[in-house]
Image (spheres, coloured by chain):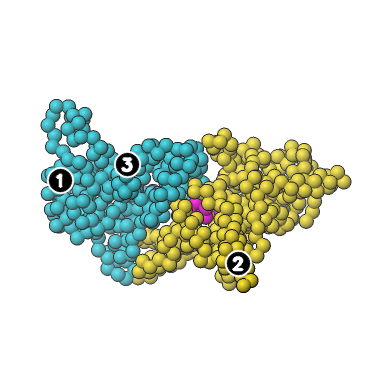
Chain colours: A cyan, B yellow
Amino acid sequence: MNHLGFKIDKVKIASFDFTCCEGCQLQLANKESTLPAFLGLLDIRNFREISSERYDDYDIALIEGSITRSDEIERLKAIRAQAKVLVAFGSCACFGGVNSLKNKIPGEEAVRGVYGDKTVQTMPSTKISDIVPVDLMIPGCPVSKAEVERIIVGVVTRAPNNLPKYPVCVDCKQKLNTCLFDLGEVCLGPVTKAGCDAVCPTGKTVCLGCRGPADDMNFPSFIQIVKEKGLSLDEMHEKLAFYNGFADFLDHES
Amino acid sequence: MIYKVISKTEFRKFIDALVKHNTAYGPRAVDTGKDGKPIYQFMPVTSADEIDFDYTVTHSSAKHLFLPYRDELSRFRFNDEDWEQEVRYEAPPLILIGLRPCDINAINILDEVMLHGPYPSPYYLARRKNTFIIGMDHLPLPDCFCKSMNRHTVNHGFNLFCSDIGDKYYLSINSSKAYTFLKEFMLEEPSYEDNCLLIERRKTIKQSFTTNIEVTGLPVFLDIEFDSPIWQKWGDKCLSCGSCAMVCPTCYCYSVEERFDVDLKGSSRQNHLYSCNLIDFAQVAGGHNFRPRNGDRLKYRYYHHYRGFAANDNQQICVGCNRCGRACLADINPKDVINDLRLERESCMICVSPSPDRT
């Protein structure tokens, strides 16, 4: 391909799912209006949602899902060895995700609750950066296709890629939404990284922090605000733990 | 300026005709807060019935109708090794109903910044010229402090201004367009009694302010307090969430981004309203950040508003609407921050400069 006099190459990409719902990968096959153009930028080597062909030579590997079985560790390490750039794709891969909720109860109890007496090998859910080095995180539950498009375009045109550093409130105020704190709810928008277009608060649903903490967010002040407004700290903790994106802050607090 | 009076029933008919045939925005209740009070915003309206004429205050200002939160400055089309740039300034006509004097003053301040500097903004000019503004007075809320900023009255920057004198509005007609529109409706010359009611109304408004901020000499005072620990005290509370700047009627700082189309055949250059409170506002190439501390970022927002920057003729740009104070979850508001600064200096004068010893 030629772009403004520069030769540009398609991105040799592969996508792999670990413990997840595959919803993030499915996002890449959505947004039909720009889908042909988007696929035109990619040389898909391995991506079961999009193509039945399988090749082992790829530059960028998208990893969706968290790690919950020992065989997943070996598979992930093999992908890391092959990929030039490894991307934690979606909240499960970035933080451990919803799967991490099971970490709060004993493993056998979790298995029994879901599978009954069947034997299932499992371990606590971990984010992929606990196992292998990660080059880029694209958080979200699911990821935002528009954001992924911008990142891929940035890779192809060799332009810098930056996720927003600021909290969801910026986008939320730009939508003229009523602040959910004004309606008496605990919303994680003030501490969560923007980039989702405040889709949940726009639908009158509180932010549960699927994109993880905003850069340099003010956690002590946030706790103080929840307290001063007479809102439930337990509810706040439950929400902060939902996607496991705030684990570092919660550990630090206790 | 031409003065007339109009009955409220007739005024509704006028507004109804206006909004039915034009794109219009007016105050509407969008939610009920947990205190049971309605929450208002300037929203699209298509009939007079949708407008809350007796609204208190909108949560966000009307700024984004002149300075959109995200605005395309130009489009680029690429072909082989060349490119074309396309710039559009067109703005569709817009009717804006129910702006308060402080809101209109805010737009007049934006006019100074956007139109009277060395690089006037054609994007802003197009929207400003094509917007028909109907102002309405109101009794101040307990936390309004526009009188302290001397922005509680306005004498230009609108097409029509309505003062509530009971069953009627006292109209200040400030454009031939407004006069022509109103010709179709029943207007009366203000009677002696109407004039008295207007004076009474203005007096009531003036006397109803309960929040006052001492702004005399504030620019110099702020210069002296540049290193005050007060900034970090309030900065420690600041969430750096930018809510204050988003709802503010005069915060105009922005960033510019280039966004390629996914097919790489074109791109869009976009202006994105930003806030000096956001963590990367002063971050430059190489990742260096001139203002990594939230106290410093908060300070610069206050400096811009109460000391003034060269770009806006060293004018104070705050109009005293206190939207930032209401939107701030951490309860950071101009009254408390400025009072805190003044208080600190006063107590400090006492402790560091006692009378010299007589011995």
Q: Which mark is residue A241?
A: 3
Q: What amino acid is found at the position of numbered circle 1 in the picture?
A: Glu
State the residue at coordinates (45%, 52%). Answer: B239
Range shown magenta: B241-248
- Check the picture and name the quadrant holding the C terminus of chain A: top left
Q: Main secondary structure of the magenta part?
A: helix
Q: Position of residue B159 (x, y in %)?
A: 70, 53
Mark 3 crowdedness (10 Å alpha carbons): few <14, some 14-19, many ≥20: some
Please identify, in this view, whether the residue under mark 2 or under mark 3 is nearer the observer: 2
Q: Earlier in the sequence, mark 3 or mark 1?
A: 1
Picture coordinates of residue B240, whole percent (x, y) = 45, 54
Foreground: B37 or B272? B37
Q: CA distance from mark 3 to mark 1?
A: 24 Å
- Marks 2/1: CA distance? 73 Å
Q: Is residue B118 magenta?
A: no
Mark 1 falls within which chain?
A: A
Report the amino acid beneath label 2. Pro
Q: Assign a secondary structure to mark 2.
A: loop
Circle 1 sits in a helix, a strand or a loop, which is it?
A: helix
- Badge 3 and badge 1 both on one subunit: yes
Residue where numbered disc 2 is placed: B354
Q: Which mark is residue B118?
A: none
Nearer to me, B63 or B299: B299
Residue underneath mark 1: A72
Whether marks 2 and 3 lie on the same chain = no
